[in-house]
Amino acid sequence: MSYIHQVKVKSVQNDLGVILCKHCNAVIATLPTNGVKKFYNVCSSPECAEKDKREGAGVQKEESLKSR
Ligand SMILES: [Zn+2]
């Protein structure tokens, strides 16, 4: 449990984690992480949303939303 605490405190200064759009590589957001990390998501562009639908990659997100 204390691990989460440490990360939060350390990460205030540097946002090493970055969320990239997996279709156009736009930076969607940065995250305070302990070390350089890349995450892939879909940006708000309609084109990318459409691509994401076609690839069926949005299924995972929908599932995680339903499970809550
Ligand atoms: Zn995009």
Image (cartoon, rainbow, N blue to C red):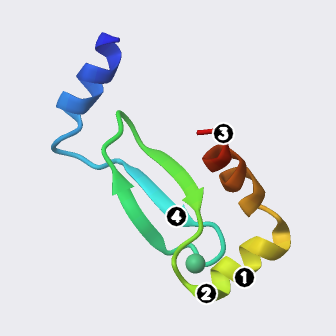
Residue identified by numbered label 2: 46
Q: Residue furthest top?
A: 1
**Image point 38% across, 63% down: which residue?**
29
Upstream in sequence: badge 4 or badge 1: 4
Disc 1 C-beta below 8 A from ligand 1: no
CB within 8 Å, label 4 to label 3: no
- For label 3, the SS is loop
Please tell me whether mark 2 sits on a helix, a strand or a loop.
helix
Q: Cα distance, mark 4 to mark 3?
A: 25 Å
On the image, the x and y values in percent for residue 45 come to 55, 84
Where is residue 4, by image quadrant?
A: top left
Res 40 label: none
Q: Is residue 41 rendered to the left or right of residue 29?
A: right
| Residue kind at label 4, given as amino acid type | Leu
For the point 44% across and 68% down, which residue is it? 28
Q: Are marks 4 and 2 in contact (CB under 8 Å)?
A: no
Q: Is 26 rendered above or below residue 58?
A: below
For this rendering, which residue is in front, 22 or 43?
Answer: 43
